[in-house]
Image: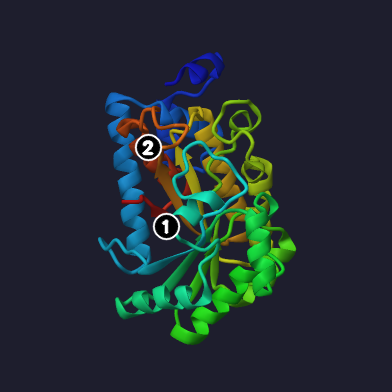
Amino acid sequence: MTLLDATTAGPGARTPGAALARAAAGERLDAGDAHALLTAQGVEFERMLTLAAAARDEGLRLAGRPGVITYSRKVFVPLTTLCRDRCHYCVFVDTPGQLRRKGESMYMTPDRVLAVARQGQALGCKEALLTLGDRPEERWPEARTWLDEHGYASTLDYVGAMARLITEETGLLAHLNPGVMSHDELTALRPVAPSMGMMLETTSRRLFEEPGQVHYGSPDKDPAVRLQVIEDAGRAGIPFTTGILVGIGETLRDRAESLVALRDAHERHGHVQEVIVQNFRAKPQTAMRGAPDAALHEYIAAVAVARLVFGPRMRIQVPP
């Protein structure tokens, strides 16, 4: 248990044993149950893993493929590595100066997009995963200039055009990860994308509001904004992939509340097709390069609790 968890749990906090009993009985778990399970140790930890494994196996049986773990063959199409956010752990983003030094364009050109998509098609991919930073033209004049010169109103306008191009030319289905979008933007992209996605990461407002924390200065990492995107995607009937990021400074209670918030959104709309439980790994040349990786025990616990919170029918992804 982290210091913040130890000091905020309170005298009435639920015990792992009580939460395990509720999970074993198939009861709907709340944030208090999930928090308690995340603190499980020893025999209770092993019991939690057993229950989670049984729920996973039941889900595979219900899906008609007992014992078979699947994955989707996607080709990765990073339309731009520019972004207006400043997340302390990110190695995806570049500045315009870095792109120029590498001899790269501010955005992948349509010809380059198609070349990468066709390589994926030749290797048996069925989907094209379009990923990019959030609204780079609102931070970088170079991004705005590129879009203007190529006839696109916005980065999202270009995303839609490239999704349409990929499907028309290769037959690959476009899965879009362009970050925070409004309800109108989601519905505008819906015709060119069978599915979309955006990680919630965490519901922690402290990580967003407190100077020095991982999401400070990143407007698109406001938890309320991200939850609204997930809600809007559900209202629009968009199959959606989302998830949490473990080990970026959030408390165990934050993890519990994040999982329950995603579960509740899915119960309202039935649109979440996959929940990713992503572990933090320190990367060179980032503000968090000296931070410890997510501890294995805590990470395994987060995966198990995600399974118990969502139940057997949800697909839980543990990235390689």
* Rendered residue at 38%/42% (across/down): 303
> Which colour scheme appears in the figure?
rainbow
From this view, report whether residue 244 is shown above or below residue 43. Answer: below
How packed is label 2: few (under 14 Cα within 10 Å), some, or many (20 or more)?
Answer: few
Image-based side of 320 in relation to 155, left or right: left
Q: Looking at the picture, which amino acid does disc 2 mark?
A: Pro
What x and y, as percent, mark residue 249?
49, 29
Front residue of 245 and 141: 141
Residues 246 and 143: in front is 143
| Label disc, if present, on residue 315 of the rendered structure | 1
Point 31% across, 39% down: residue: 49
| Mark 1–mark 2 distance (CA, rounded to whole Å) | 31 Å
Q: Name the residue at 50% across, 60% down.
A: 131
- What x and y, as percent, mark residue 114? 45, 78
Visible residue check, residue 244: yes
- In the image, farthest residue toward the right: 184
Residue extending furthest toward the bottom: 169
Image quadrant occupied by the N terminus: top left
132, above or below 298, in the image: below
Residue marked by disc 2: 284
- Which residue is located at x 45 percent, y 84 percent? 171
Few, some or many residues within 10 Å of mark 1 (<14, 14–19, 20+) = many
Q: Along the polypeptide, which appears first: circle 1 or circle 2?
A: 2
Q: Nearer the viewer, residue 314 or 227?
A: 227
> Which percent across, then down, holds residue 248?
47, 33
Q: Nearer the viewer, mark 1 or mark 2?
A: 2
Q: Which residue in the rendered view is the most extreme toward the left? A: 67
